Image (spheres, helix red, strand yellow):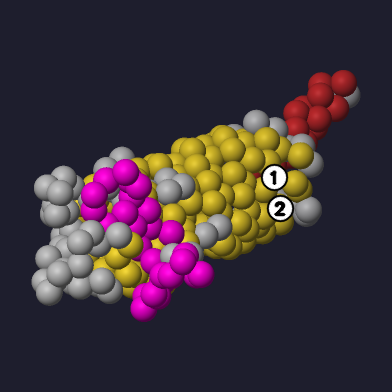
Amino acid sequence: MKFKLLAGAALAAVFAASGVSAQETGWYGAVDLGYHSPAGLKTESDGTAPDGAHYHYEWAADKDWAGFVRLGYQFNPNWRAELEGGYRPGDLTSVRGNAVRQQPIGLCTPGIVRTAAAPKCGSPDGSIDSWTLMANVLYDFAPDAWFNPLVGAGVGINRLDVKALGQFSGVGAVTATNVAIQNLTVDDSDLAISWQAIAGASIKATDKLKIDVTYRYLGAANEHSWQSTGSGLLQPGAFTGAYNDQSVTVGLRYSFASPP
């Protein structure tokens, strides 16, 4: 009798374990929305300024919203992998160079005429938008708890769309071939390999639904390059620089696995 009871308990434990494993593996989908803060892109041009040196401009974009979609697979309670698409928009806020150089030291609002009464330069028009496709690997520290810290890393590609229209500031001596108002135009995109570090936590809402709070640091494995078109003798050519970004998002992650 005791043997039958022990055997029954063992079988019950086996079936319970198989039910848990069915819940802990399988496909899931997720959507994240939040806020991102891009670092200034410190760039160098392949063309030279009138003083013979290359342009060194820092391109700054505004902080803005960010969105991500993810499709992943849970291999076991702790490890999972996912494919992530991300979008990080940003309006161009400034393009500035070295103020002590005898060259155009940045870009102003197009068409502006600076005077002693109105000395401000303004900001150029444009945007710097990032589109990423990343493969991530993540580790869940407490998958069965209602609060689960997690870390991860990813690698993939980043498409950077750069649009700009600005007026050169400080063109130097005004002559017939170097007029006072000259513009720089950019409308280009470029792909580069990128990586990201991930940290955060998930909150268990139901057996199938989790709330993810995620921090991402996006770094560049190689630099982006975009072509510019100047006016007259001011032709910087292509600018090259690395795109880095930080973001914080809140998302919903839903498991497609069948319940036990």
Q: Are marks 2 and 1 in contact (CB under 8 Å)?
A: yes
Q: Residue, x 61% and y 50% (percent of image)?
A: 248
Tell me if mark 1 has few (under 14), some (14-19) or many (20+) residues whose alpha carbon lies within 10 angstroms of its own. Answer: many
Q: Amino acid at mark 2?
A: Ile
**Secondary structure state at the residue bearing disc 1:** strand
Q: Amino acid at mark 1?
A: Ser
Q: Position of residue 42 (x, y in %)?
A: 34, 46
Q: Position of residue 206 (x, y in %)?
A: 78, 54
Q: Residue, x 53% and y 40% (percent of image)?
A: 198
Q: Which mark is residue 57?
A: none
Farthest residue in the bottom direction?
A: 111
Instruction: Find disc 2 in the rendering and name its residue.
Output: 211
Q: Is residue 110 magenta?
A: yes
Q: Which residues are magenta?
A: 94-119
Residue 159 quadrant: bottom left
Q: In terms of sequence position, does the residue under pointer 2 or pointer 1 come before the other?
A: 1
Residue 254 or residue 251, whichever sits in front: 251
Q: Is residue 155 left or right of residue 64?
A: left
Instruction: Find disc 1 in the rendering and name its residue.
Output: 202
Q: Residue, x 79% and y 41% (percent of image)?
A: 146
C-alpha span from label 2 to label 1: 5 Å
Q: Is residue 10 visible?
A: yes
Q: Is residue 214 magenta?
A: no
Q: Position of residue 19 (x, y in %)?
A: 69, 44
